[in-house]
Image (spheres, rainbow, N blue to C red):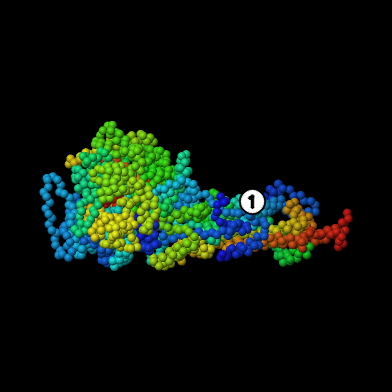
Amino acid sequence: MASAVERFDDKASETFESVGRTTVYRGELLRHPVYSRALHWMVALFFFLALFSGFGIYLPWLFRWFTPIFGGGQLLRAMHPWFGLGFVVFFGLQALNWLQPMIWTPADSNWMRNMKKIVSSEEKMEAPDTGFFNAGQKVQFWEIVGGCTAYLITGIILWVGAPTFGRILVAISYVIHDISALIMLGGIFIHIYESTFGQPGTFQSMTRGAVSEAWAWTFHPAWYKQMTGRDPVQACEEARRQMTTGNKP
Amino acid sequence: MTNGWIDIKNTDMMLIMGGNPAENHPCGFKWAIEAKIHRNAKTIVVDPRLTRTAANADMYLQIRAGADIAFLGGLIRYAIENNRIAKDYLLNYTNAAFIIKDGFKLPEDGLYSGFDAEKKVYDKKTWNYEEGGDLTGKPVAATPPEKTPPPLKAGTPPPAPVLPQKIAFDLSLQHPRCVYQLLKKQYERYTPEMVERITGIPKEQFLKAADLFTSIRKDGDMKKVATIIYAVGWTQHSFGTQIIRTAAMLQLLMGNVGRAGGGVNALRGHSNIQGATDMAGIFDILPGYLKMPTPTDVDLATYLKRITPGQAKPDPWDSFNYWSNTPKFTVSLLKAMYGPAATKENDWAFNHLPKIDRNYSWVNLWNDMYEGKVKGIFAFGMNGVMIGPDSQKNIDALKKADWLVVCEIYPDETSEFWRAPGITADEVKKINTTVYRLPGAGFAEKDGTFVNSARWLQWKNVAVPPPGQARLDQEILATIFLKVRELYQKEGGKFPDPILHATFSYTNPYNPSLAEVAKEINGKALADITDPKTNTTIKAGQQLPGFAWLKDDGTTLAGNWLYCGSWTEAGAMIQRRGTEDPSGLGIYPNWGWSWPANRRVLYNRASCDLNGKPWDPSRRQVWWDEAKQSWVGNDVPDFKVDSSPKDHMGPFIMNPEGVGRLFVPLGAMADGPFPEYYEPIESPIPNLLHPNQSNNPVVKRYKTDMDKYGTVEQGFNVICTTYRLTEHYHYWTKNNPMNVQLVPEPFIEVPTELANQMGIRGGEKVKVTSARSHYIAKAMVTRRIRPMKIDGKEMFQIGIPIHWGFRGIAEDEGKTAKTLANELTPTVIDPNAFTPEFKGFLVKIEKA
Amino acid sequence: MEFSRRTFIKGTVLGGAGFSALGFDLTPLHAQTQALKISRASETRSTCPYCAVSCGVIIYTLGDKAKNAIPQVVHVEGDPDHPINRGTLCPKGSSLEQDILNDRRLLKPQVRRPGSDHWEDISWDQAYTEIAQRVKKTRDETFLETDTQGRTVNRCEGIAWTGGCTDTNEFNYLAVKSMRSLGVCYLENQARV
Amino acid sequence: MADRKALQVEMISAHPGPVPGHGVQRNLEVCKLVDTTTCIGCKACEVACVEWNDMPFSPTTFDNTYQTMPETRWNFWNLIKFNEHQKEDGTIQWLMRKDQCMHCADPGCLAACPADGAIVKYANGIVDFNQENCIGCEFCISGCPFNIPRFNPETKRVYKCTLCSDRVGEGLEPACIKACPTGCLKFGTKDDMKFIAEERAKQLRENFGIEKAGVYDPQSVGGTHVIYVLHDATDPERYGGLPKNPEIPWSYTVWKWLFKPVLGTFALFGLLGVCLHYVTAGPRRTQPEPPRKGERNG
């Protein structure tokens, strides 16, 4: 990545480090530093604000009860673009931050190929070559990147309006804006599920920033190996033995 | 207008020329559209520009500004040649059959007989009918010698020539000196080729238009009617009156005058311009079109003898000659103006009136002020600086005046001439004119009567009080006059009698109630008068029901005999709002009151044939009722009600001959009994009919240093015309934000080809210069004005709207160059109506 | 009722979404018929001052002619009863409200003294007195009882009157009566041009 | 106010559930006829509209035409378009067409509008903006095939000709139609206006030699409550951009009223999917999982 971007990124994370605090207990690994977490939650916040205010415009005759929440149609229409802008801006920063680990690797292609097994939870452990982020997360990341660019372009067109951009362009942007919203909506359901009930122990990675080593070797073995230098499968067997034998003390 | 606004819906054919009704009289133009929709009427529009009227027309011809008589002459020739004339109408209702005396010469060389080159005036005694009887079929003989007049006392001027009492006539219309043959010979020269060379209208276009217009009389069919609609496009020329004469002659030839949907209809420009003319706001007449006395009228009798026409007609015919009642109208007017002071002994205060022996018309007024003769001027609602012509001359004239009293509702150019653009600070110090600007009342703040173009008098009511310290105009005028009277009562002065005796006996003389004045105008009885025929009596002080009741023995008074009947004992006819129109011809007899005698279509006797049956049964105006032995109908008959058709009384009751005048005898016209084509004073080419007499011979040019006239040699090669827009009203709506929003800035309409030659695009500033001054505005480059071939040479026409001066919303914001359109126009006037030549003069145009 | 493409689609979908209790709303929504600004204004029938078609106009003014309500124009519209314009008006007639209610209207008498470069206010009485004196002075200076050939003419060539064409008949009559009594010959009017 | 017979509402923008009072009363469909063959471009309609609605005056500049301004504005709802059209024989035809809201039977603006009650169509055919509910999103500008709605930046609302719904509601005719000097504008029921328009077009074809004269009432927007009589009905474009075939963009018809709700439900499937996954495949726990109660280890 361009050095200027990296420098900016590091400087930003240092400023956040000095402000925020991440306590990593023994047996845990630092997953997400303060900066990543802060960005994540800002993105999430703006996303939901944009989503709910968008619903008021998206299917007004279905979600008309959103409008009063935002203080009336005029205010909702006025705020929705700013929320969207906030979402896109913070996600842009997030993208800079995570650009490096999000690069698509062959491992991810394999992951995608046997995704069916993973989804059906038949395969208990992730494939050993799963890095910091697995393919699902990368797909969603890139999908959001695409979505954000679509939001930015069509959003500006819709915001500035037909007098400037002409009615056909606005009509097209209207459709694209909706489609990217729907896709992102679908993605968010999965994202929230996976990070909460679908994969216990994940949520704390975004709240406290630290994860248990077991979690790490189960779901991100390559990253675990990289962080600790130990072999994740051995570590898991070690832990299993210890659990079955040492479970009395 | 001879007919009226709503009457236009009855027409089958319209020639709209010299006027732009769609833009300047939009709500009146609705009736032309009604005619198109309900009668499939066709419109022919002839105009220097493709106006919004032309956009609606079935046929549009672009004509060179000022070449109107050539076109109309061509139409007359075409109508005669193709026998598309109304034979019976022509024979019995016009003077076509009358024979003209020997010695009368048609103007092949541009001059009629009797022209005095130095004084530039005609001696009109040869323009007269021949005395005699019915010469039908008799051999042609020279005019019999006149009986020698009785010897004159020394020193008295020779009596003015009069019409013969018995006029010779030839019903076969073959006599070489009969009006019809002279007419035919006169317009022989106006061939379609000549029309094309003069007017620039291609031959085939002209023939198509001529055929369409005269098609209503194809093989003598008398059912259809055509109307001619015009406005100041015809009047504002140095031969304006003659253009309208040509149109009237064309309509007489085709038998259209007096019929529903026919006539010659002038669309007058202002709401009460017709009223102002009737009430004689102009120098040469008194209220009711009575002539102003001249110094030779030593007493009332001489005056009345001069202006009261005697009857002059072919023996077997009859003529009402209504002007024979002039003495009754004059005495009644004098009684109204001077009341008890007008007695039989002092000739009904005849000498209280000024006697005029010169031309005091508009351009002469400013010319004489420029020469220092006129010291003081009242400008009550007339913006002399904006009107011009040659506005700079008017501004300089005002600098020489002592005082100027302006009564206006908006700040205008005349009241602020002393700070017109171009006047430097120290020059202002040298202008010694005292200017009083008095705030007058707007239309919604005063009542009173307006007379519209169709001669309808209509009362209007007060809606709001005048704003600020503004006062009613009549209050201002009355107070000034009464203050002058007080000064004369206190200090005496030159001939105070008229000032002291003028009747101002209104309830509140300083603010006369217009209702009382209207009653005075209608006329009252001063003693009990009875009508022997109907044995009805009118008590003293009662309102008179009609001008038939006026007397010349001082027992009646009437401010204007024409309006007698507008406010009778039965109440204010002018306030009536009856909306019924049983005949469906748009007569509306119970709405307001139209002069004369609530008649809506003038000369409507001519809408019937010789035995009193309407030419077109579907449009019955008036007809002869054999049972009642009188004329009846949906409209008030413009006729002697009990004169049976057998008496053959002519339908044009105001003319001594009782018939329409194709040939105008004696003094009525200053420049010729027939209209002859003359070039405008500033013309691009010599007159193709008679090059050595290019212009109207009797038109005088002014001599001050400000009066310059441009020629093509001096580089003025573009023809220019001025006009109004529908969104603006003269110099008034430049103060109205709504209208300024519609048309924000002045512009000059320039043909695309001319713009390309000069390399200018739409919106660029352009400077138009005439021999007198210049005008700067943005160019509107348009294809609606096309280049023209005049006598083979390519020429361009441009047009300038007149609405912007140096005080107005756009002007005060600096969005205009603050030049006046009428700075360009030439100071030359029509010899009969004295209207300046605002249309068709020469300019040059360049980038500003 | 002819099924336009979109109402069909909406119908099917609405059926599906109709069950969602969330969006149903019983409050009827219909346009409040707005009271017209002219419904209680007082009407005055007048004639448009501009061209000679003489369109009838209705001038709606504030208040119902009660004494304490000073009328001011609220709206101007064509008079449907008038046989010539039948309620129609041109762009000038329709904007008459701005002609009556206009901040450029002259509100007080003013005078420009000789040599001065600005307007001074003047009272009506002072204006009348000065004008009357000037008229008398100019008339006495330029009045002609008889012309060069000794014929009585009684005319004053020093004063001119230029009257407008939107003055009423009655005003014109007063003008002709007063000016002719002064002996004015330069009596002209817009009817001339 | 409520008791007076209000203008009966027929369609409301973005309104859940059926329109209250729909079809309860008979109602005649009003219509404005604009006969461009008798329009004289005098702009009385423009002035009457600005005066009746007390709209503020906006500055205009000269741009080489008689047309008051290039396009209508939020405070200038109807505008006469002047066009100098060159005919085949080289002569100039000066066309004048009054441009204003066409009050479509199937309004694109109402279809596109996401604000509940911002755009209302009455049973008499008038399409009216209700500024209180307008959220200023300008979608209606994109939805309108005739480029009519105009946005006011200060008030963040959109404005257009209302066919004087207030006057018509009180039984009067619209202000512009009353003012029109030549009667080129007429007002009445849609059937009457269609009849008069067809008669006039026939008269033009037969008596005035204008062969292609016709009536403009585009069915692609369900017919409009403003119809034109044109000199040449086959080429309305020459009248200053009157669309020959006015179309509402697909986004506000097929997409908004069919796919969007359908896709909307797909998105909900995402939610359903995760719930199903939870109850079936179950969460994926960190390994090694502790043995469950009563289960033998190993």
Q: Residue at x 55, y 52 (%)?
A: D4
Amino acid at pointer 1: Pro
Residue C87 in view: yes
Residue D190 screen position, x and y as percent: 49, 61
The one nearer the camera, B708 or B216, is B216
The quadrant in which residue D281 appears is bottom right
Question: Which residue in the protein does label 1 denote?
Answer: A68
Residue sitting at the far right? A248
Q: Name the residue nearer the viewer: B378 or D252.
A: B378
**Residue at point 18%, 55% (across, down):** B165
**Label 1: how many Cα within 10 Å (few below 14, some 14–19, many 20+):** few
What is the quadrant of the N terminus of chain B in the image?
bottom left
Which residue is more in the foreground, B799 or B78?
A: B78
Q: Is residue B60 visible?
A: no
B470 vs D182: above or below: above
Answer with left or right where residue C25 lies relative to residue B841: right
Disc 1 on helix, strand or loop?
A: helix
B164 relative to B845 in the view: left or right: left
Position of residue D95 measured from the top left corner of the image (x, y, whole percent): 42, 60
